[in-house]
């Protein structure tokens, strides 16, 4: 394999393309976050006449998605600054996603016309699993913060 200026040129070219890929993905997360934000408020204003609670739950669900998209955007910015991907933002994203899941299933169950015992037990199991996931992720955040940054590989 060739070592020298030509190989270094290819490596620099690939690193530039990698950076551009992260930049375009970051902008995509930002634009999607803004679109989802605008649509969430539009949907809230059109649904509020049918009922405040379902409209508010839908808005909260969508705004949590916006927070996830912005957290991904922030993670990409931090990576471009430091060239290090950290674990903590992904733990936060998973916590938010699990919270969204609890809210979604709760709203679906609360407004279900055909709520059977089996469906309710499935809902309880789903919520229980998501709560356990959230607790595990919070413990993971706690443990990740206890590790000094210098000791990370």
Image (cartoon, rainbow, N blue to C red):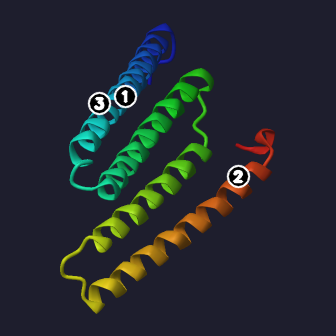
- Return the residue at label 3: 35
Q: Residues within 10 Å of mark 1 (few under 14, many from 20)?
A: some
Q: In the structure shown, which secondary structural element does the residue marked by tag 2 occupy?
A: helix
Q: Closer to the camera: disc 2 or disc 3?
A: 3
- Whichever of callouts 1 and 3 sits on the residue coming sooner in the sequence is 1
Q: In the structure shown, which secondary structural element does the residue marked by tag 1 occupy?
A: helix
Disc ID at residue 25? 1
Quadrant of image for the N terminus:
top left
Discs 1, 3 touching: Cβ within 8 Å? no
- Residue in view at x 37 percent, y 69 percent: 106
In the image, taking residue 152 as reference, residue 67 lies left or right, namely: left
Q: Residue furthest top?
A: 5
- Return the residue at label 2: 144
- Residue in view at x 21 percent, y 42 percent: 46
Q: Nearer the viewer, residue 68 or 53?
A: 53
Q: Position of residue 130 (x, y in %)?
A: 47, 69
User: How far apart, in angstroms, are the residues tagged by discs 2 and 1?
Assistant: 26 Å
Asked which quadrant contains residue 123, the reply is bottom left
Residue 61 to residue 67: above or below: below
Residue 51 to residue 151: above or below: below
In the image, taking residue 86 as reference, residue 22 lies left or right, namely: left
Q: Position of residue 6 (x, y in %)?
A: 44, 10
Q: Residues within 10 Å of mark 3 (few under 14, many from 20)?
A: few
- Residue in view at x 70 percent, y 43 percent: 153
């Amino acid at each position: 394999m060739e070592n020298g200026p030509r190989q270094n040129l290819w490596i620099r070219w690939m690193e530039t393309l990698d950076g551009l890929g992260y930049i375009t993905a970051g902008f995509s997360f930002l634009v999607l976050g803004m679109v989802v934000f605008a649509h969430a408020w539009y949907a809230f204003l059109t649904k509020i006449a049918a009922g405040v609670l379902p409209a508010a739950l839908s808005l909260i669900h969508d705004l949590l998605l916006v927070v996830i998209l912005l957290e991904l955007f922030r993670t990409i910015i931090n990576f471009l600054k430091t060239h290090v991907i950290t674990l903590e933002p992904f733990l936060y994203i998973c916590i938010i996603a699990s919270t969204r899941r609890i809210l979604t299933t709760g709203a679906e169950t609360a407004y279900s016309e055909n709520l059977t015992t089996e469906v309710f037990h499935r809902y309880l199991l789903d919520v229980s699993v998501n709560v356990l996931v959230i607790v595990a992720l919070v413990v993971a955040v706690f443990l990740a913060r206890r590790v000094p940054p210098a000791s990370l590989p």
